[in-house]
Amino acid sequence: MSDPSPGPDGHDGEPIPMLSATDVSVSLGGTQILSDVSLAAECGDVVGLVGPNGAGKTTTLRVLRATLSPDSGLVRVAGDPIEGLSSKQVSQRVASTPQATELAFEFTVRQAVEMGRTPHLGRFERADSGDREVVEAAMERVDVARFADRLVTSLSGGERQRVLLARALAQETPVLLLDEPTSNLDINHAVNTLELVADLAREGKTAVAAIHDLNLAARYCDELVLLADGEVRAAGPPREVLTAPTLRDAFDAETLVTGQPATDAPLVTALADRGSVDRTVHVVGTGGQAAGADPPGRRRRHRLGRRGPRRRRGRRARQRTGL
Amino acid sequence: MRTPGKTALWSIALTALLALVITASAAVGPVWIPPDVVAQVLLNAIAVPTAFEVSGAALEVTTQPVFRFRVSRLQRLIVMNVRLPRILLAAVVGFALAAAGTIMQGIFRNPMADPSIIGVSSGAAVGAVGFIVVGASLPFGLGLRGAAFAGALVAAFGVYLIATENGRTPVATLLLAGVAVQTFLGAVVSFLLLNAGESVRRALFWLMGHLKGAAWPDVWSSLVLVVVPFALLLVYARDLNVMLLGEEDAQSLGIEVERTKRILLALASLATAAGVAVAGIIGFVGLIVPHVMRLLVGPDHRILLPTSALAGASFLVATDTLARSGSTELPVGIVTAALGAPFFLYLLRKREVHEL
């Protein structure tokens, strides 16, 4: 924490994390979703939650934004237990973008982003020019100002996702929680969105993001928390978390971890499932050699032969139906 | 953000429309009174306080009429004592039903929700029919309305309790509990009607919704029971906008979702109960008016709520005028449904084509 003044528990020199979860366990409908999950995010950190589908990433975010209270464990925002804060107090500290939003009624983009100002308005207070400036700036920053007057219902999934991010920015909170912020985005907007999150962190915000793409996570996060089956399997800088053994443990998949060009982040390449690794390499090797020597027709026969008769029959059948 | 100006403009326009509809409605009846005479009678009724005097514990207010048009006594009596109470009661009931419908559609995030979705009308029906069948010897008036009002609130609160677990009331559960309770109460009403004997006609007439026999005290009591919840609902309009995003999103934007839902349900049910208690079951106003206004002014409840309420008032005054102007008087519930349903279907088709 860059703030030199010690907080309530800061007298011992230990910085208080902006956001922390300690031994959080959650079960929903009799199924254990999270078991003793702990994590901490300092000011200026981008923490990535990675892990396979159903690992508990979204549930962790729900606990962190206090829309789900854990069965046990404690979440603190700026040192205060989150369960002791009102919705309004939480919403002034933690903004979040859900994976998707349900909007059955037709609001414009600007109206949807304006809702991000709700935590800062009293019951009888109207949005003033200051609020309007925040809304416009938020829309500029995520590149949705161009279609500010369009209806949210008319937007594509990716555009909506950016509107949700704009809403979270308009909330002006120190903590930002992002659930798969890039899942519907094209590569340009995905990179821009994560660059923006990194910029926001440099400005002092704390961001926790569930990110599916391990390489984007490696590139933009300071810390990663690898979840699997509701448990933290590894946590730390991307280089320490994204290793072949931890990924095998979490994803049950073989990976090749190298370096990303132009950055020092690790690059994870998923290989085919374990049993097929040898054969895949073998086929590539012989295929390459064969390409130089054999005429095309023979090479095809050769490859078909290697893949076995069942495949071949299938291919013939397809050809017949094609006729 | 330009909402305040837009809200004011629409509200003024719809208030003017309501004044016109009321004037036109008061002209219509067995005796035709020209609208300009009606306007003069209504303007004569406007009085401003000129002096306050405290005598003992009571405050005596001396009032002075603003206008002094010359109109015949008979015309004044017909407008002020016969037609106006009924017209104003129609306005209050329409206002309440449309406002409550808007709120329910917002809470349920479903444009097909109506004011009685959590059983208010069914409860009122049991109260009213029960009173008519069992207690028919008691004096007509407050007794019947009190029974309907109480039945409405008991039913709504019962549905709310059934759907609430650990302090949370999921709207899907609320909806299903409402449907089940309405079905059950419908059975109770049918049973009561079977045993109603001679009073079955009166019970049926109540069930179809009518404003016959309205008097000034009814107007004042229902006005209070509608305007107070409405004013409070206006305060929650912005919260309801945020609730449209979904409850979890709303909570992370600082809305105390469960508390807000509870308050909104209570206020909307109170307004509906006040309307249904005096007018019986009047369908479609609370469903169709918010729907049409949403097409015109958009989904922002800060503008949608007041405009729907005002439009609902005009709509019910107009339909009740139709209901009472034929050779035999129809229950207004029949007229609203007969006019409202086809119009609603037209909108539905038009929107579907529009969306494709």
Image (cartoon, coloured by chain):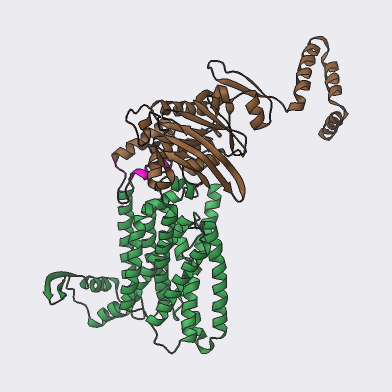
Chain colours: A brown, B green
Q: Is residue B298 visible?
A: no
Residue at image location 53% in from the left, 28% down from the top = A224
From the viewer's side, name the closer residue of B287 and B160.
B160
Q: x%, y% of residue B244?
A: 46, 50
Residue B203 covered by magenta stretch: no
Extreme residue in the top direction: A293
Q: Is residue A320 above or below residue B304?
A: above
Residue at image location 39% in from the left, 53% down from the top = B301
Q: x%, y% of residue A192?
A: 48, 26
Q: x%, y% of residue A46?
A: 47, 29
From the viewer's side, name the closer residue of A4 and A238.
A4
Q: Is residue B343 above or below residue B193?
A: above
From the viewer's side, name the closer residue of A27 and B172.
A27
Q: Is residue A15 above or below residue B174?
A: above
Q: Is residue B232 above or below residue A59?
A: below
In this image, B300 relative to A258: left or right?
Answer: left
Q: Is residue B15 visible?
A: yes
Quadrant in the rendering for residue B292: bottom left
From the viewer's side, name the closer residue of A70 and B348.
A70
In this image, B15 relative to B199: left or right?
Answer: left
Q: x%, y% of residue B267?
A: 39, 63
Residue A114 covered by magenta stretch: yes
Magenta region: A107-128
Position of the N terminus of chain B, as image quadrant, is: top left
In this image, B143 relative to B350: left or right?
Answer: left
Tally the marks: 0
